[in-house]
Image (tube, coloured by chain):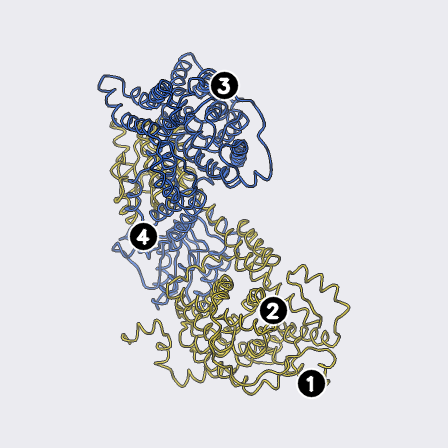
Chain colours: A blue, B yellow
Amino acid sequence: MARHWKAGKYLPILDWSSDYSREKFSSDAIAAVIVTIMLIPQSLAYALLAGLPAEVGLYASIAPLVFYAIFGTSRTLSVGPVAVVSLMTLTSVSLIAEPGTIGYLETAIALAFLSGLIMVVMGLLKMGFIANFLSHPVISGFITASGILIAFSQLKHILGIEISAHTIHEQVGELLSQLSNVNVPTATIGISSLIFLFWARRSLGKLLVSIHIEKKLAGSLVKAGPVVIVIISIIMTAAWALDQEGVKIVGAIPAGLPDITMPILDMEIFTKLFMAALLISLVGYVESVSVGQTLAAKRRQKIDPNQELVALGFSNIGSSISGGYPVTGGFSRSVVNFDAGAETPAAGAMTALGIALATLFLTPFLYYLPNATLAATIIVAVLSLVQFKPIIDTWKYSKGDFFTMLATIVLTLFEGVEIGIAAGVILSLAIFLKRTTNPHYAIVGQVGNTEHFRNVKRHVVRTIPEILSIRIDGSLYFANIRYLENCIAAHVADNKACKHVILQCSAVNFIDISALESLEMMNDRLNDSGIKLHLSEVKGPVEDRLQKSQFMDHLSGRVFLSQYDAFTTLSNEVSQGY
Amino acid sequence: MARHWKAGKYLPILDWSSDYSREKFSSDAIAAVIVTIMLIPQSLAYALLAGLPAEVGLYASIAPLVFYAIFGTSRTLSVGPVAVVSLMTLTSVSLIAEPGTIGYLETAIALAFLSGLIMVVMGLLKMGFIANFLSHPVISGFITASGILIAFSQLKHILGIEISAHTIHEQVGELLSQLSNVNVPTATIGISSLIFLFWARRSLGKLLVSIHIEKKLAGSLVKAGPVVIVIISIIMTAAWALDQEGVKIVGAIPAGLPDITMPILDMEIFTKLFMAALLISLVGYVESVSVGQTLAAKRRQKIDPNQELVALGFSNIGSSISGGYPVTGGFSRSVVNFDAGAETPAAGAMTALGIALATLFLTPFLYYLPNATLAATIIVAVLSLVQFKPIIDTWKYSKGDFFTMLATIVLTLFEGVEIGIAAGVILSLAIFLKRTTNPHYAIVGQVGNTEHFRNVKRHVVRTIPEILSIRIDGSLYFANIRYLENCIAAHVADNKACKHVILQCSAVNFIDISALESLEMMNDRLNDSGIKLHLSEVKGPVEDRLQKSQFMDHLSGRVFLSQYDAFTTLSNEVSQGY
């Protein structure tokens, strides 16, 4: 075990495979069957959303699951095509190639490879923290806007019309002008699929529970709702030859497993795709890790965020070399896997086997599957991403965060994913910096005869005019030190009796060189006007660093271990007339 | 007085003029004479550095001083042309017009106007804090690089050769290839001026003190050293008609005061100049405020940073409408003013009068002043800006800050001022963010039977396995919350007995919406695995805000006033088997 440990860090499969049992196998197998059934229509639908042939969705649901089983640290995460990443694939690849062409497919495959490469490199360099800069308002706003964009993009399939515009306002215009061209059979299938799916999501669960089906199983069956409507609409379309009436169908899917080939590794395409690949990596990683963490916590398991990057990276590279497009750990598929009882990533590997079998034998049966039905499954899935409550909650909690979210939504909708996310990240940073720019500080005094010092504004405390004690509630750095300098200078100027200034540094975690420089100048200036500067409660690492500078030699006063020490020592000295 | 107070905030002249006395007048007048003598060669030299006719330097030393006397809050700051701002003027205006043309002069005048406008607006909007984002390594690196650039740019005047290249590496090449064209009389004047000035700076002060001249006066006399060499070189050049030998001289300066005219207010030029004007405003403001603060502190006076912006803004607008170029509060001139005994801004107004008189009557005597002498005064002044000790100190104190400084120096030297400063600011921010990304936290336990809780790693403390107490030493926000989440999840997963997690929030100054969301999820996840989450020592403003969210309703545990409360209450409950 000890010998395995290090290898297990990079190949988590070694951790869980060593005590794999018959019981675990049967739990995993059951989960795999349920997830496979759910995934088949979902994979086809998301490929359609990404502007790709339907079978590419299936290909992207085989190799990635196997790679994740080897490298992933979550026991139950299910990797494959997801809505948001499919949309991002569509928007970025459309800029380079025309959907429907070979070039488009090759670019999407190259995008998966590049995105996988970025993830592996970031994981090995332990750069997972970069994803943290996508703040909650940015992710939430971006996902809401994506949900709206995706749902809207599917309306043309539901109604059987052609829309060629790219921006959402042009699309609305085109949709309205095309309303007279709606294909009635298509719209009938599309709208009834929508109604069935919404009903299933709202009420089927309750119905199943009321007929004494176990709650978790009922939940999984509801998630398989799309399979039912897929089967019904295939039968109806085939029986009435609706494809002759203008209903667009999936058509002939090449049977058989994908070929293993290297994607086109063209520096020019890589350069063009780099920003898109980076964003897909970050967004996909954030989505996947948050699902993985939620599920791991439920069973008191851990996931390793940087190893997750490596695992998702290899999953994407796997997707790419087997003809698939960018993938990540998806929320709904992972929850179904978890609820269906999956114990180890072997469930994922068995799901991959299931999808492979479907690819081999099931595709002829999907010939008559109407695009409108797939579009309906997408709309129902993504509309659950569009939530207004978080927007209202954010408004109540913090206007700055709300503004960031709103800007991300509006810019993602009207200017595109990249600008929306970039503006959101910049706004988040600006608001954070603004918050640290005016750090809280308090003039403190002694509480009764205790060793405690509290804010003079909130507590009845003892102070003496010769000593000004200031507690600083934050680290000192370039953007806030001048503010504090001005505050301290103003307090000193207002208090002509002042002879000692004590900075209580209990909440100071670092002092950068700019702040150090300002402290030196503050020390000199105070000294010029006959005031000594003292420090109290300086943390170990901060003091170590200060010792490397000349500040400690120049300091006019002393460094005290506690504020109590500082205050009592100095007030004794003052009363003795020093 | 009370009635004056508000007006005094915006017109500080009302504050000091009301009790202006005969004694103050005479102190101010003496300071004004000394500063005037020092300023005449300096103003001419900096105008030359900025690529402008010499008289523009004089014009920029009249109106700005009067405006600053009305609006400024420092009693002793002296406003006018300074080296760094002159260099920035040269680099930005050269991009738009050819030095020596009317267009160049008009653009420099427009730059002063725009820069003044930006300062006034920033001051009125209380946006002085923006200058804080120029961290110490950026300013220090930028000034060092500027010093090198300026000194180098003057070598052609010292040697009497022509250099037309813009980038410093091209200039070095051109200089070397032109060495054979050196004008010997010019080089003789230039090099002997340099030697005299360096000697004066090093040794004249000691010499004067040794012959019993008062130390402060000696210091001021040393600063007037350039006047001596100016007079000597004028006499020599005139006597031997060295201008016939190829020595470039200042030549005919139009006598008389500048006309008051509006600068050309052309939106196209303003758009082109905006970034340069913004940078000049920020750099000029930072330089001026730091000088002002140092001098104010020596006499326990205050300056108001936002009002300083307004004052510097009007000074620049004043410079512009009287034919001058961008100005700011200068270090050496202000120190001379202070040391010479100036008491109020009236000293500045009298200096303006002195310069005006010089402009009216002295200019004919400056006809034979060699450019080489002016260049020597610039080189000696700016080489004091080039200091290697701060670079070494920064290296010792913090590698990150050192790297920022080095990048700023190298990029300013080779890619220009704007790129150098921009890269420095971005690096400073990145390093700060990196520092806040992994905030310090500590597992804490009870010290003996006291109410104190300390880090288990550094102190002998009491803990019980059922309770995990974590003190978080920083505010919670989007870029650090996931790190903490992972740390807490890891601690919980490692400790199977854990039933309660207490977050001690004594150093948490704010929790943004991303952190709130993560806390909610952490609460849910811990709850799923049978662990309650508690908070202790939450600050008032943070708790107020949390009450606006649903977090408090969902919190599985409680909020305790103190960590001691939390630990004793929960350990009692645990021991009673709850």
Secondary structure beneath label 2: loop
Residue A28 picture quarter? top left
Q: Please, what secondary structure does the residue beneath circle 4 have? A: strand
The 10 Å Cα crowd at callout 3, few under 14, some 14 to 19, many 20 or more, is: some
Rendered-image quadrant of the N terminus of chain B: bottom left
Question: Horizontal and vertical percent for residue A275?
Answer: 51, 41
Q: Is residue A105 left or right of residue A149?
A: right
CA gap, disc 1 and disc 4: 73 Å
Read off the chain for label 1. B
Single out the mark in the foreground, 3 or 1: 3
Return the mark for residue A453.
Answer: 4
Q: CA distance from mark 3 to mark 4?
A: 76 Å
User: Distance from label 3 to label 1 (Cα)?
Assistant: 99 Å
Residue topped by disc 1? B238
Work out whether A345 lies above or below B83. above
Task: Tell me whether marks 3 and 1 sit on the same chain.
Answer: no
Q: Which mark is residue B98?
A: 2
Q: Tag 1: Cα neighbours inside 10 Å, few (<14), some, or many (≥20)?
A: some
